[in-house]
Image: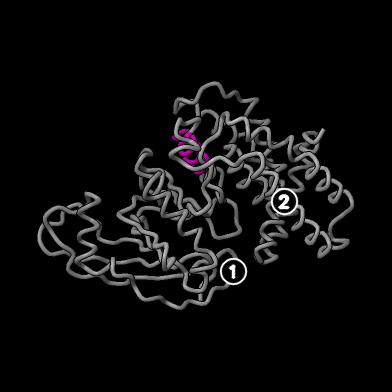
């Protein structure tokens, strides 16, 4: 079995897809420009593990003929058998990112993709990704927060990612889709139903003060959503940007951080990723220690990448807006049966951030 963010997952290794057969893998690597005259001779499973959404296999490759520069190992990511159908949209979304968005982005923001496919009939999907095991690592073991230096590298990478799609002309057209006012209203109606059941479950563990905050938030959600519906200073957000979804260079390796796990990307206010990382994942002392410095670094990096017309004050306002919106996160997590060790701690942390940052003022 394997553990993923406190969740125990039984490993039931699936049958490997045909794409990792030597001939097909050779074709995929050649199409990606990663292999010239040589050919894959042998494919060996080096390691495998399950997460809640996917099965991840590290493959070792051996070649025949000239293979200079070709990858010696790859990461095969595919549907986790137990959730292949119920969570199929996550796989569809991630394949879409790697095959459609990633080729249009600067390199060294995400692992390189050598091929991917989603089959609408069977709902099977796979991705062949760059193996960064030798050069990169996750900063800490969940739930430990990163060091200051690690957090700076993470936020620098996140700002580079956001800058690449900032106010991009293709947003909502060739890249992603906009939620209409009606879509947002329906989503909030669904949320309100989940919240009622969530509050009933918690009973007196959810204080009257917090219940009032939720009720006011739901009532004011239409006004709050005007920020999103302005379509200004928006980008592609990761959607699950906790620090354990970043790969950092190992000691002694001169490289940049990479983001991974893109099954929740969407168009949104950029600070949603920052608020999820800090306000939802870190307790007050750690957040207060790093928050201002990280927001400063984020803004400086945006400017360095050519983003203009977005002031430091606008970043602060958006960050507080996003922190307030993240009171919805624990409820959504509970509604899809995320373990209570995750959503309960997220609830406590984000509520402390809302109070600390005076986010309730945004409700009028």
Q: Is residue 43 above or below residue 154?
A: below
Main SS of residues in magenta: helix
Marks 1 and 2, how far apart in space?
20 Å
Quadrant the C terminus occupies:
top right
Residue topped by disc 1: 7
Residues in magenta?
A: 154-165
Q: Is residue 280 above or below residue 197?
A: above
Dot 1 falls on a residue whose secondary structure is strand
Asked whether the beta carbons under mark 1 and mark 2 sit within 8 Å of each other, the answer is no
Q: At which x and y percent is residue 289?
A: 66, 41
Quick one: 153 or 357, which is closer to the camera? 357
Quick one: 293 or 274, which is closer to the camera? 274
Q: Earlier in the sequence, mark 1 or mark 2?
A: 1
Q: Is residue 338 magenta?
A: no
Q: In the rendered view, does 26 fall on the left or right side of 99?
A: left
The structure residue drawn at horizontal position 33% and vertical position 59%, both measured from the top left corner, is: 128
Dot 2 falls on a residue whose secondary structure is helix
Q: In the rendered view, does 313 fall on the left or right side of 27?
A: right
- Does residue 301 appear in the picture of this structure? no
Q: In the rendered view, does 53 fall on the left or right side of 343?
A: left
Question: Number of callouts in the render?
Answer: 2
Quick one: 299 or 172, which is closer to the camera? 172
Residue 360, by quadrant, is: top right
Query: Crowding near pointer 2: few (<14 within 10 Å), some, many (20+)?
Result: many
Q: Is residue 155 magenta?
A: yes
Residue topped by disc 2: 349
Q: At which x and y percent is residue 313?
A: 65, 25
Q: Is residue 355 above or below residue 25?
A: above
The structure residue drawn at horizontal position 76% and vertical position 52%, both measured from the top left corner, is: 192
Q: At which x and y percent is residue 206?
A: 84, 57
Q: In the rendered view, does 293 fall on the left or right side of 198?
A: left
């Amino acid at each position: 079995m394997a553990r993923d963010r406190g969740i125990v997952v039984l490993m039931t290794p699936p049958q490997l897809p045909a794409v990792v057969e030597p001939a097909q893998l050779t074709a995929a690597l050649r199409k990606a420009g990663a292999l010239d005259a040589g050919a894959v001779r042998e494919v060996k499973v080096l390691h495998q593990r399950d997460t809640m959404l996917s099965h991840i296999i590290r493959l070792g490759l051996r070649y025949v003929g000239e293979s200079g520069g070709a990858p010696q190992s790859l990461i095969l990511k595919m549907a986790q058998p137990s959730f292949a159908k119920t969570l199929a949209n996550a796989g569809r979304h991630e394949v879409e990112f790697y095959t459609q968005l990633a080729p249009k982005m600067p390199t060294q923001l995400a692992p390189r993709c050598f091929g991917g496919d989603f089959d609408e009939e069977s709902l099977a999907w796979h991705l062949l990704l760059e193996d960064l095991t030798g050069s990169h690592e996750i900063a800490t073991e969940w739930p430990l927060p990163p060091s200051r230096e690690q957090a700076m590298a993470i936020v620098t990478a996140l700002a580079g990612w956001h800058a690449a799609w900032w106010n991009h002309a293709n947003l909502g057209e060739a890249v992603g889709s906009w939620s209409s006012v009606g879509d947002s209203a329906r989503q909030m109606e669904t949320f309100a139903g989940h919240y009622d059941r969530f509050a009933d479950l918690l009973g007196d563990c959810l204080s009257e003060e917090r219940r009032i905050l939720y009720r006011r938030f739901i009532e004011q959600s239409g006004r709050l959503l005007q920020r999103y519906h302005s379509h200004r200073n928006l980008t592609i957000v990761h959607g699950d940007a906790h620090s354990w979804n970043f790969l950092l260079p190992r000691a002694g390796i001169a490289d940049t951080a990479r983001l991974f796990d893109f099954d929740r990307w969407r168009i949104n206010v950029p600070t949603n990723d920052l608020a999820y990382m800090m306000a939802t994942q870190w307790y007050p002392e750690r957040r207060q220690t790093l928050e201002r410095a990280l927001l400063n670094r984020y803004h400086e990096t945006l400017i360095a990448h050519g983003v203009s017309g977005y002031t430091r004050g606008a970043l602060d306002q958006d960050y507080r807006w996003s922190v307030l919106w993240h009171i919805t996160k624990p409820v959504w997590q509970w509604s899809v049966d995320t373990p209570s060790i995750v959503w309960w701690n997220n609830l406590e942390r984000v509520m402390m951030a809302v109070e600390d940052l005076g986010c309730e003022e945004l409700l009028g």
